[in-house]
Amino acid sequence: MTTEILIPVCDSAALEDGGKGVRFPVTAGGEDAGAFVIRYNGVAYGYLNRCAHIPIELDWNNGEFFESERRYLICSTHGAVYLPETGRCAGGPCRGGRLRAIVVIEKDNQVFWQADEYVRPARA
Ligand code: FES
C-alpha cells in the first residue's frame, strides 16, 4: 500500500493545448529523474521525461514536447513520436514502446501529479 501524494506542478493556465509542457523533478526507481505535463484536447497528461528508445530526455528545448503539427509528442534526439493521450509509440525508433505515464489531476485551476510505487517525489 502506498499513500496517495498529490504534488502541485503548475497553474492550469500554464498548460496551453498542444503547447509547451512544464517539467518537474521526480525520482524514478530511487534515481533522480525528470517528468513533464502537457495538455492535449483539453486534458492534462504527465509522463516521465524519458524516451523509450534510449532513456534520455525528450525535449531539446526546455518544455518543447510537441512536434510542429501539435499532434504527437516527439523525442528531439532521433524523432520517436508518441501519442499524447497514452504515451504509446506512434512511429520512429521507439517502436513497441511507450512513455511511462504519471497520474495527473487538475483541481481548483491547479495541476497536480500523483506519486506511485515507482515515480516518487524528488529528493529534498
Ligand atoms: S533517444 Fe529518443 S528517439 Fe532516440
Image (spheres, grey):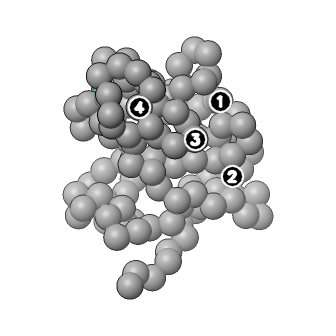
- For the point 57% across and 14% down, the residue is 68
- Viewer-side residue, 62 vs 46: 46
Name which residue type carries label 2.
Asp
Q: Do we see residue 51 in this rendering?
A: no
Check disc 1: other Cα within 10 Å, few if <14, some if 14-19, many if 20+.
many
Q: Closer to the camera: disc 1 or disc 2?
A: 1
Q: Earlier in the sequence, mark 3 or mark 2?
A: 2
Mark 4 highlights which residue?
89
Q: Earlier in the sequence, mark 2 or mark 4?
A: 2
Mark 3 highlights which residue?
85
Q: Which mark is residue 18?
A: 1
Marks 4 and 3 sit apart, C-alpha to C-alpha, by: 11 Å
- For the point 69% across and 52% down, the residue is 11
Mark 2 highlights which residue?
11
Name which residue type carries label 1.
Gly
Q: Position of residue 104 (x, y in %)?
A: 57, 57
Q: Position of residue 95 (x, y in %)?
A: 32, 28
Q: Closer to the camera: disc 4 or disc 1?
A: 4
Q: Earlier in the sequence, mark 1 or mark 3?
A: 1
Figure check: 2 above or below 113: below
Name which residue type carries label 3.
Glu
Marks 4 and 1 sit apart, C-alpha to C-alpha, by: 17 Å
Residue 99 image-quadrant placement: top left
Q: Earlier in the sequence, mark 1 or mark 2?
A: 2
User: How many marks on residues?
Assistant: 4
Marks 3 and 2 sit apart, C-alpha to C-alpha, by: 20 Å
- For the point 66% across and 37% down, the residue is 40
> Do callouts 2 and 4 mark residues in contact (Cβ within 8 Å)?
no
Q: Which mark is residue 88?
A: none
Apparent side of residue 104 relative to residue 74 in the rendered image (left or right): right
> Do callouts 4 and 1 mark residues in contact (Cβ within 8 Å)?
no
> Do callouts 1 and 2 mark residues in contact (Cβ within 8 Å)?
no
